[in-house]
Amino acid sequence: MARAKYQILVIPYYIENNSIQYCIFHRNDTNIWQFIAGGGEEEDDSVLVSAKRESMEEASIDTNHEYITLDTISSIPVNCFKNAKEQWGNDCYVIPEYCFGVKLLTKKIILSDEHSEYEWCDYTTAIKKLKYDSNKTALWELDCRIRAVLQSNQL
């Protein structure tokens, strides 16, 4: 499959007793903590389809879970990707990264070979461990959205 000219980011989360936990992943190749991240494929019908496919590939998250499309869209330099110039040409300098949250009903994750481990943690811990600002911005937005829903359900 050919790589599409965009990236996706997916933040798995779990809520228990109004406590929100986020799942972060430790990448094998870069030795950093991040959320599920991957490329779209030209065969994908939409960025949401790409997000669901990547979530299944990297963490065995079933595609039937509830996804939230975030407003956060970041620009990723193409020098972060192998063969970017060959795929997208010399005039492509950045690609968009579309962000999603996915609500899980259990904390069960089955890792792909891309990751050595995962950790469920609260917002503060996740922010400290994440490397990329794009991940931190998307997490902030998702956390605000979830807290607003939780607060409105308590009224």
Image (spheres, rainbow, N blue to C red):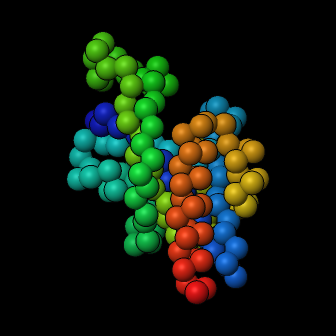
Question: In the image, is residue 137 above or below residue 108?
Answer: above
Visible in this render: residue 95? yes
Q: 2 or 134, which lies in front?
A: 134
Image position, residue 151 (x, y; %): 60, 77
Q: 58 or 126, which lies in front?
A: 126
Image position, residue 146 (x, y; %): 56, 68
Q: Look at the image and tell me in which quarter the N terminus lies.
A: top left
- Taking the spot 70% from the left edge, 82% from the top edge, the residue there is 17
Q: Please, which residue is most extreme toward the top here?
A: 90
Q: Please, which residue is most extreme toward the bottom here?
A: 155
Visible in this render: residue 119? no
Image position, residue 71 (x, y; %): 41, 51
Image position, residue 131 (x, y; %): 66, 37
Q: Please, which residue is most extreme toward the front here?
A: 155
Residue 105's image quarter?
bottom right
In the picture provided, is 20 more to the left or to the right than 85? right
Residue 67's image quarter?
bottom left
Q: How many labels does the image show?
A: 0
Residue 59's image quarter?
bottom right
- Taking the spot 58% from the left edge, 87% from the top edge, the residue there is 155
- Taking the spot 38% from the left edge, 36% from the top edge, the residue there is 96
Question: In the image, is residue 127 above or below residue 87?
Answer: below
- Taking the spot 70% from the left edge, 48% from the top edge, the residue there is 127
Q: 32 or 142, which lies in front?
A: 142
In the picture provided, is 87 more to the left or to the right than 17? left
